[in-house]
Image (cartoon, grey):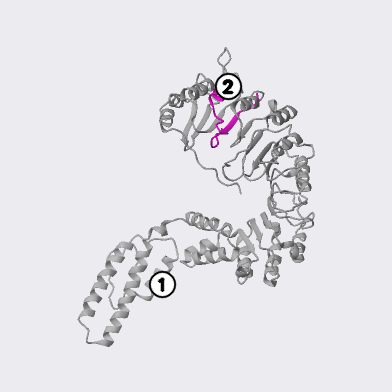
Amino acid sequence: MLFSSSCENPLLSSDTFPTPHQFQELRQLLRSSHIPPNVLSLVIFSTSILEEYDAAIAGMQAEAAEMDGMLTARAKVQYFIDGYRALQSPVRRLPPEILCQIFEYVSERMTNQPVNLLAAELWRISRVCARWHGVVMGTPTLWTNVVVDGSERFLEQLLPALRVSVKRAMPRSLTVQLQSLDSYSRRFHDALDLLAQSSKHWRRLSVDLTNAQRYPRIRTTLFGLKGKLDCLQELRLVNVQQGDLGDTFETARELRRATIIARGRQTVPDLPWSQVVSLTYLGTPSPHAADLHAVFRVMANLSHPDAAFTLRVVGDTGYLPRVTSHISSFSLYFTSFTIWRTPHMEAWGRLWDSLTLPHLHTLTIGPYDLIDDDPPPWPEVQFRSLSRRSSFHRTLRVLRIANVVIDDTELRNVLEPLEALQRLEISDQGDHHTVLHGLLLFLGQQTPEGKPLRVPRLKYLSCDSQLVFTPQIYFDCILARVRPTPGKPVFEAVLSHLPSAPKEKRKEMEEGPLQNLVAQGRLRFSFEAWVHPTSKH
């Protein structure tokens, strides 16, 4: 046997080498992960035979028939050599787990692509070799992102691609995205019916119902999902209008996260609100009063102890009902083009006046997408009233304020009663400076015993700053917060300098005394360039 480790100098005639048995053995090796120990010696031996063929061919130009035979025999040897050189390729040493991770990156990169495009890409990868084919076809997670697009250009291969993807993904849960549902195509509706058969495996579902109201077949399919969404945990709905969904999702017993995106007049569907942990409502300009009222009623129904509510407000809120909600986290985001300008300057104040949040521990306020050139003013009176009503002095642990017009006096008034606050994140914005001497002096005050006097439980301070304060003021503030001896909890400070910050101050901050505290294990300190926030879409 040619591949036997005991056969160091195989006696083979060039007329018979390689034999059909040797070809068969090479093909089996190429389809496996095994690499024979004597590959290099085989390549050297085969190369010597190849050189003999080349010499013989050069001396036999006149013998055409014999030349053809020689060329055929040479091609066999060349194939033999190429095959064994392929066995030495580094990619063959990658274990299947690593290949799977690489292929999963390709699948994740195409998360929002229609299922037929994803399936075509995976098929292309699987045709590289038998080993890759086995990995692609045997890894269900590669096929779990299913995007069904009703656009005409994607309909031709939609049904067969969907059938393959659902079959290959089983028994894993699916991430399903339905978009461009305004289609009368029979192929599209057949694809929806096929997909609905796997609804018990859906884990995440995104439905864009824009223009779908004109197509009753779509609504019938969605109504038919009621009671079949056993594994659904995350739901994203776009442009839901009255009657689109009914109570389809009210019985989804595993549902925990919901996102509702309004594009025009929209209603809030019936969901099992008592079990929802995270709700995001992204409003539309000039919302109808009934829309926000419905959102606030839902906010009152979020009773899970860890419930988080994210609200994007665009336009005048109008009158809002008074609501008591037991959510633990509230994120309020604004857009740049309406709410803070006349005649909507009081919209934010009305929102604070309407709420009572007795269990809130995290509050985030800022722009939804990009930094606003015209940031909103801080409604101090209304917020202080909300703080007293909701007992923030006992409950609020985390406060994030980004790109809001608030002077350091107002900010000190906000922070003064927050005795339980542990994490504070604030930022400067444009020509408006929030991180000033007054704030740092306020946070750096100490009792006669050397303990922090204001916001005594603060453990984390993050500032996006133009460094309009003197570095020593900042150093003193942090030093007042650090424990006198190493131990837990360690105070953590993050200072991100904005592009407009003076270069000389940046250097002074980098070379300041805080690095000694870091070396002693008493402080975690990060001084870095400001990074533009990413979109929250």
Q: Nearer the viewer, residue 261 or 285?
A: 285
Which element type, helix, strand or loop, lies under badge 1? helix
Amino acid at circle 1: Gln
* Residue found at x 70% / y 51%: 262
The quadrant where residue 85 appears: bottom left
Q: Indicate the position of residue 332 as horizontal and vertical percent values.
A: 66, 40
- Quarter location, residue 178: bottom right
Q: Is residue 469 above or below residue 247?
A: above
Left or right of residue 535, residue 16 in this image: left
The residue tagged 1 is 24
Farthest-out residue, front: 342
Q: Residues within 10 Å of mark 2 (few under 14, many from 20)?
A: some
Camera-side mark, 1 or 2 = 2
> Is 429 one of the magenta-colored residues?
yes
User: Is 304 inside the magenta-drawn segment?
Assistant: no
Residue placed most toward the observer, 467 or 170: 467
Q: Residue at x 51, y 61 (%)?
A: 135
Is residue 405 rendered to the left or right of residue 69?
right
Q: Quadrant of residue 82?
A: bottom left
Q: Is residue 1 visible?
A: no
Q: Position of residue 489 (x, y in %)?
A: 55, 26
Q: Which of the labelled discs sits on residue 442, or is there none?
A: 2
Can you say whether 410 is above or below 29 in the image?
A: above
Residue 222 is at least partly visible in this image: yes
State which region is magenta. Answer: 418-440
Residue that appears at 75% across and 59% down: 225
- Residue 125 appears at what percent x and percent y? 49, 64
Mark 2: which amino acid? Phe
Mark sitting on residue 517: none
* N-terminal label among 1 and 2: 1
